[in-house]
Amino acid sequence: MSSPRRPTITDALRARRLLADHLPPTPMWSYPALDATAGATVLVKHENAQPTGAFKVRGGLTLLAGMDGAERARGVVGYSTGNHAQSLAYAAARFGAPCAIVMPERPNPAKAHAVRAMGAELIEAGADLGEAAERAAALAAERGMRLVSAADEPDLIAGVATAYLEVFDREPGLDALVVPVGGGSGAAAACLVAAALAPRCEVIAVQAAASPAAHDTWHAGGAPLTRPNRTRVEGLATGRGFALTQELMRGGLADFVLVGDDDIAAAQWALMRDAHTLAEGAGAAALAAVLTRPARFAGRRVAVMCSGGNASEHEILACGRGPRIARRTAG
Ligand SMILES: *Cc1c(COP(=O)(O)O)cnc(C)c1O
């Protein structure tokens, strides 16, 4: 299968215009206590402050805004462990389009509840995301709805790219930008925008070591690989690489690194303690990459993508009982 059309910076600028009526820019700033802990200037891009609690809503709204009336009336189908689902459900409600979401059985209750609250039809089917995807494809065919993948979808990447337009508008002199990866739409978008606006900024992707498909695919040169998918961090839990996002990441990333699930939990705690920010695991993975590589980031100006804040209550409690990163003071 050939990969879909490659989005450009022009698509990102167009998406910014489409989104202007729907979403204000999210904040990005640093916290002295977090800078001290990290030994670097850490700018936290707060996508946890989106109305759906994650950056993906930028993509969902861009996709729905770009559909014609007839296609919109038929509706959209997505499959997701949570945040892509909330993004589609939110955007569909906003544009009055029908929306069906397939989630693997026993989903994160907070995310399932949010999808239902937005008025989407929620179907729990399949042991994992692969099986949910098959069910979603069958449903889309049966009802004539548009099936929306969370990764290989140019409109979603263009929409997500607006987050990085905001990052570089605010901080054109960044040394590095660290982005968490599942399917790779976020990191692909970051590469696209950095290449146009901040070519000297290193874009570094991070994935969970227990689900390294995108990481291994990138290091192997880009032909999509499948890998075990055992991370407990939703949002980073993907078992394969995707052609389109890999194509954009190929020339755009300075590096692609891995972090452990416990490092992610420790970074989640550091965000709560030092930046009074509730991140879900995926939203703390970029900070985990910085905290586990102090020599690499020492004294630099680094933006970390806090991609989402939809932690379940179970996850928040587990994080409080987990390993901690020592508090440090500056100087
Ligand atoms: C989806 C998601 C990611 C991973 O994004 P991709 O675009 O799939 O790589 C990271 N963090 C959160 C909170 C997410 O929902």
Image (cartoon, rainbow, N blue to C red):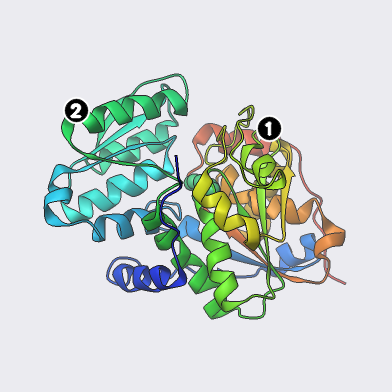
Q: Amino acid at mark 2?
A: Glu
Question: Which residue position is annotated with label 1?
Answer: 210
For label 1, being within 8 Å of ligand 1 is answered: no
* Image position of 10 (left or right of 204): left
* Residue 50 x %, y %: 41, 58
Q: Is residue 278 visible?
A: no
Which residue is painted at 60% across and 78% down in the image?
A: 171
Counting residues from the start of the chain, the first of labels 1 and 2 encountered is: 2
Nearest the camera: 289 or 26? 289
Residue at the (46%, 71%) spot, across then down: 9
Percent position (x, y) of residue 213? 63, 37
Residue wearing tag 2:
142
**At label 1, which amino acid type do we have?**
Ala
Q: Residue furthest top?
A: 127
Give the total number of marks visible in the rendering: 2
Image quarter for residue 145?
top left
Image x and y of residue 96, in percent: 15, 51
157 vs 208: above or below:
below
Looking at the image, which residue is at 50% across and 52% down?
185
Q: Dot 2: few (<14), some (14–19), or many (≥20) neighbours within 10 Å?
A: few
- Decide: is 115 above or below 6: above
Q: Which mark is residue 261?
A: none
Q: Quadrant of the C terminus?
A: bottom right
Secondary structure beneath dot 1 equals loop
Q: Secondary structure at mark 2?
A: helix
User: Residue 199 location, x and y as percent?
Assistant: 65, 75
Query: Could you say which is closer to the camera, residue 121 or residue 59?
Result: 59
| The N terminus, quarter of image | top left
**Residue 58, quarter of the rendered image:** bottom left
